[in-house]
Image (cartoon, helix red, strand yellow):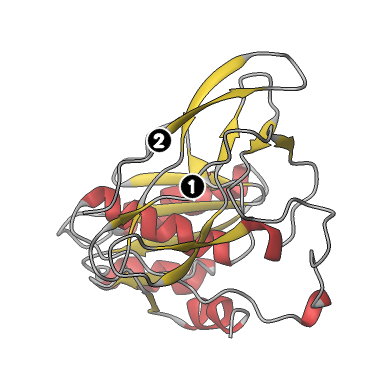
Amino acid sequence: MGAMPESVPVSCPVCRREHVYAAPSYPCVCGAPVAPPLDHLAGPFVVTHRTWDDGWVTVRCGSCGREGQWPCPELDCPCGTILRVPVSGAPRPGSAGDGAGGPHARSPVFQPVTIRTAADAVTAAALWLRRLGHHDVRRAGGRPPSGVLLTAEGMRALVEPTVHPASLRDVECLWLTALSESARCVCFSLAGYTDDARAAADRLGVPLFVLDLTGAPQPVNSQADDLAAGLA
């Protein structure tokens, strides 16, 4: 088994609040939990501008030695500041090599999370949304009729992590929520969709994905195909 994530003190440079932060761990393909090694000596920096490349960090699994790309550890301060916590051995923004490949550099390979629990399904959907460019993914405050609602700037995503197919009501409520907030939307489900849910999604333009047990979202309709094509 890999080492448990360690906690480090983090001070917000904007409001001076003190936090204790532990980086989330993700399962390696070998099954061991992997968490980025946090730099105890370097202070956090404020995230003011996001790019695809700087949202990921290379971490080596302590059990099998594989290297994988994982989301950079970040902390949301109550004052509204997003803090990125430095990782040992990783370059800080502005150092040599940042963005060296320019806009056409190869993006990190998507590392799906093996789904064993409902929480894994939510994590898999969040990681895929981050790959899509939404680095501020978080669980929404309100509760949808079913499943878990994730929110990011300009995007709302419903994750149905149970053995029940997503319903017509699920799709329509997601679409109405996104419409009221001038956002796009996407739906992920472990058990697929009812026929009327699929028909409504096609009519409303809602991309539908099924999460297989490896954590990889599979497009169900043409809208999802179009969304996934942007990541090819």
Amino acid at the residue labelled 2: Glu
Q: Residue 212 carries which label?
A: none
Mark before the other along the chain sequence, 1 or 2? 2
Residue highlighted by disc 1:
37
Image coordinates for residue 51, horizontal then vertical, percent: 74, 60
Q: Bin the neighbour count of mark 2 within 10 Å (Cα to Cα): few under 14, some 14-19, many 20 and up.
A: some
Image coordinates for residue 26, horizontal then vertical, percent: 36, 55
Amino acid at the residue labelled 1: Pro
Residue highlighted by disc 2:
6
Image coordinates for residue 6, horizontal then vertical, percent: 40, 35
Identify the residue at horizontal 53%, vertical 60% (top origin).
129
Residue lying farthest left? Answer: 163
The reply, left or right, for residue 29 in relation to residue 38 is left
Asked if the residues shown at circle 1 and circle 2 are in contact, with their CB atoms under 8 angstroms apart, the answer is: yes
Is disc 1 placed on a helix, strand or loop?
Answer: loop
- Report whether residue 52 is seen: no
Q: Bin the neighbour count of mark 1 within 10 Å (Cα to Cα): few under 14, some 14-19, many 20 and up.
A: some
Look at the image and tell me in which quarter the C terminus lies.
Answer: bottom right
Q: Distance between the residues labelled 1 and 2?
A: 8 Å
